[in-house]
Amino acid sequence: MTTASFIDRLPRPLKFAMVGAIAATVHFSVVLLLVDTLDLKPLIANIFAFLIAFCVSFSGQKLFTFADRQKSLRDSLGPYFLISLISFGCNELLFAIALYLFHVPYQFALLMVLLIVAIGTYLGSKYWAFSTS
């Protein structure tokens, strides 16, 4: 069995989780970098991190997770960006609550929020952005 055929046989949720983990790692790392080196506020750094992680996430989901779907790049980019933007809105809101209401350290708060929001992003991606029906 080749590596490509092994990867093709992986269940879609696992593929999504793998791409999501990479994008979340990028997101988390960019926030840490911007807060620790440029002294940005965590909520501001989170915006820049979202934009960078979105590029990683969309590319991975389009080319890996949902590669078998024949939906064009143009037809999937808009819905995926909207799903990601809604997810980011939830991310930013939950992040702000954790930071300012519960005074959770920003690193831990961001990690929790990224995990929570990932589920909604998967469902929106599967049933809308990359859906062929």
Image (cartoon, rainbow, N blue to C red):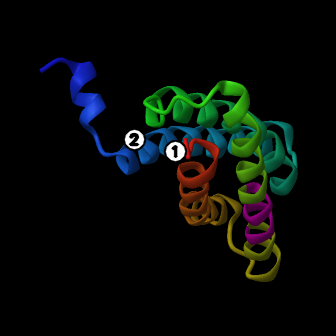
Foreground of the two, 69 or 122? 69
Foreground of the two, 11 or 49? 11
Q: Is residue 111 above or below residue 84?
A: below
Foreground of the two, 104 or 50? 50
Please identify the quarter of the rendering in which residue 105 is found.
bottom right
Q: Label 2 near label 1: C-beta < 8 Å?
A: no
> Is 128 on the left-hand or right-hand side of 37?
left
Q: Residue at x 46, y 29 (%)?
A: 67
Task: Look at the image and give the residue range highlighted in magenta.
Answer: 88-94
Quadrant position of the N terminus in the picture: top left
Please identify the quarter of the rendering in which residue 132 is found.
top right
Task: Please state the horizontal and vertical placement of residue 41, each as a whole percent of the image.
Answer: 87, 53
The residue that label 1 is drawn on is 20
**118 is within the stretch colored magenta:** no
Q: Which amino acid does the dot numbered 2 rest on? A: Lys
- Secondary structure category for the residue under label 2: helix
Task: Please state the horizontal and vertical placement of residue 125, each as a whole percent of the image.
Answer: 58, 49
Q: Residue at x 59, y 31 (%)?
A: 71
Q: Residue at x 74, y 71 (%)?
A: 94
Q: Which amino acid does the dot numbered 1 rest on? A: Gly
Q: Residue at x 67, y 37 (%)?
A: 53
Please identify the quarter of the rendering in which residue 89 is found.
bottom right
Q: Which mark is residue 40?
A: none
The residue that label 2 is drawn on is 15
